[in-house]
Amino acid sequence: MASGGSAIRGSRVGAGPMGEQDRGYHAERVQVSYWDELGNETVRHFAANLPEDEIPLTIDSPQSGLPAGRDKDNPPSVAKLEPYKTHLAYVKERRTEEEAESLLGDALSQLRARRGSAPSN
C-alpha cells in the first residue's frame, strides 16, 4: 500500500542534523548586568575577548528608559531634563529684539522690491 506522501514526513526542506558543526562556532561571552534607579536589571552579553574599556559603563534601560549602570547599589541618576523648546525659542536665544527687527525689515524690503511694491518713503 503506497501512502503517496513524502519520504521525510514531518521534516522541513533543508533540515538536517543539528549541532555546532552545522551552525558554526559559538563564541565565548561575558554577561554584564546593569541596574536603573527603579531597580530593573538588564543583562547584556559581550564577547569574552572584548577589552574591559570597550564595555559601556551605562546603557538606556529598555524597561524604563532611564540610564542604567553596573553598580546595583548606586545606579546613575537622570540628568536634568530640559523642557522642549520650539525653533522660535532657539532663535530668540541667539538674536536680540533689535537684531530680529532689523532682519525682518531687511527681508520685507527685499521681498517688496522683488514684487515691485516697495513703499515710497
Image: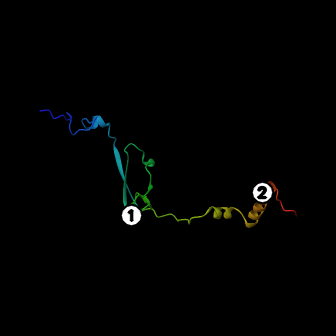
**Residue at horizontal 65 percent and vertical 63 percent from the top:** 88
Q: Residue at the spot x=37%, y=57% of the render? A: 42
Q: Quadrant of the N terminus?
A: top left
User: Residue at the location (45% across, 47% down)?
Assistant: 54
Which secondary structure lies at badge 1?
loop
Instruction: Please name the amino acid that badge 1 sits on.
Output: Asp
Q: Position of residue 18 (x, y in %)?
A: 25, 38
With respect to residue 50, does 6 lie above or below?
Answer: above
Point out residue 86 in the picture as x, y percentages from the top left corner. 61, 63
Instruction: Give the image quarter of residue 3.
Output: top left
Q: Is 108 positioned to the left or the right of 26 in the image?
A: right
Quarter-of-image position of residue 59: bottom left
Residue 73 is tagged as 1
Q: Quadrant of residue 84?
A: bottom right
Check disc 2 and report its element: helix, strand or loop: helix
Question: What is the three-letter code of the residue carrying label 2?
Answer: Leu
Side of 104 where 80 appears, left or right = left
Check contact, mark 1 vs mark 2: CB within 8 A.
Answer: no
Mark 1 vs mark 2, foreground winner is 2
Reading the image, the residue beneath label 2 is 111
